[in-house]
Image (cartoon, rainbow, N blue to C red):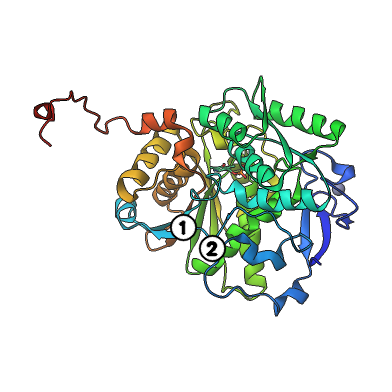
Amino acid sequence: MTHVEALTCGVCGREFSPGEVTYTCPAHDGVGGSLDVRYEYDALAGAFDVPGTVEDLWAFAPLLPVDGEPVVSLGAGGTPLLDAPALSADLGVSVRVKDETGNPTGSSKDRGSAVAVTRARQRGRSVVSCASTGNAAASLAGYAARAGLDCRIFVPADLPEAKAVQPRVYGADVLAVEGDYEDASRVCHATATERGWYDCSAGVNPYMFEGKRTLGFELARDAADADWVAMAMGNGCSLAATWKGMAESDRLGLSDGTARFLGVQAEGASAIHDRFTDEWGDGAGETAADSIDVAAPHSAKRACCALADSGGDAVLVDDDAILRAQRRLGEHEGLFVEPASAATVAGVERALAAGVIDPADEVVVVATGTGLKDTRTAGRAAEGGRRVDVDSDPDTVPEF
Ligand SMILES: *Cc1c(COP(=O)(O)O)cnc(C)c1O
Ligand SMILES: [Zn+2]
């Protein structure tokens, strides 16, 4: 049995039982009516503690909204928290990296997919779908394959090559939508609803969100001393869910206090930042950080609440700063992350300069996804790095 008490609408507060609704509040369909799962915290208070190392996110099963075994498992979660001495020295503040790149499909989206696909299977659904800028698609496809479910995903037609290939290797159907992520989302939800597929899209599916809380549980355990957690925001789900997990850990007495959250967005996709700071940009733009290239975020309100509740802040960074940060993570620490993840490091730099983060603070940046899926953009970050053409004669190798 689960410890779910109710699902509540983010707009009107109406409560539902888990069997009563599938996606959003019927009165507030679409953006804003996302359902938040509330647990029986009193029942969980004494009963829940994860000793030792976390092997994967199912270590937190009592706090997840699924009905026991069998769960779908590929080994998501339990990711390392790495110190980063050279990067810290470069930035002028103590930084550690929560390295999510080693998740089964290469991003933190696996935390949500594990829970949503388990829910799909327990409810007897045979087809799952989602709209995605790339990582959520690969992740859902991988977990669907593992669970023996069919998977249909909707992506913007111009997504990075590897992100279009990976789900197909997992056997998913990739529907490349002419247009941006918004268009893909619209087509996905309409089609899934009409054809009876289980839509796992961000902002629509409450179980996807709930799985992402496990990142917050891990940070609460392993980075209890952190003053700040820096995360990139696209839809804002990842940050909001991580904050929820951290706040729940505190409430359950599993940690002592919470960190402030720094939400980082690209200048070309700044909607959540603009709403939080009430500084409105021109609303149009582009960014090389495709995973956070979201014009109309599905969880803007939740992300803003998380930033406010944690006492945090939001900053914007430009693509040059993002690519420089990508190179710094690689060069200083041996971490190859994608641009959306590197944005957090650029954001910390920005927040330090603005006096938001103090040089004496302890900071954790979340590296949400691997750089290997977009080598074209990484090639821009690597410019200046040496590549020398050498013919087969060893004498032609230059001096270093
Ligand atoms: C999805 C994603 C994000 C942003 O998460 P949101 O929930 O959309 O805010 C950041 N980095 C990577 C690598 C992602 O895949
Ligand atoms: Zn409602």
In terms of depth relative to the viewer, which is nearer, 82 or 42?
A: 82
Horizontal side of 347 relative to 152 (left or right) equals: left
Mark 2 vs 1: CB contact within 8 A: yes
Q: Pick whichever of labels 2 and 1 is earlier in the sequence.
A: 2
**Residue type indicated by callout 1:** Val
Which quarter of the rendered picture does the N terminus lie within?
A: bottom right
Q: Nearer the viewer, mark 2 or mark 1?
A: 2
Q: Tell me which residue sits at (52%, 27%) in the image.
A: 161
Amino acid found under the numbered disc labelled 2: Leu
Point out residue 304 in the picture as x, y percentages from the top left corner.
65, 49
Q: Is mark 1 within 8 Å of ligand 1?
A: no
Q: Secondary structure at mark 2?
A: helix
Say which residue appears at 45% left-offset and 60% top-offset. 81
Horizontal arrangement in the rendering, residue 52 relative to residue 37 (left or right):
left
Mark 2, residue position:
219
The one nearer the camera, 319 or 96, is 96
239 to 225, vertically: above or below:
above
Q: Is residue 395 left or right of residue 131?
A: left
Say which mark, if any, is on residue 1: none
Dot 2, crowdedness within 10 Å: few (<14), some or many (≥20)? many
Q: CA distance from mark 2 to mark 1?
A: 9 Å
Instruction: Tell me where residue 310 appears, x and y as whole percent.
Output: 60, 60
Q: Residue 353 location in percent, x, y? A: 39, 48
Labelled disc at residue 364 = 1
Viewer-proximal residue, 357 or 181? Answer: 181
Q: Is residue 250 above or below residue 128?
A: below
Q: Is residue 312 left or right of residue 6?
A: left
Ligand 1 placement by image quarter: top right
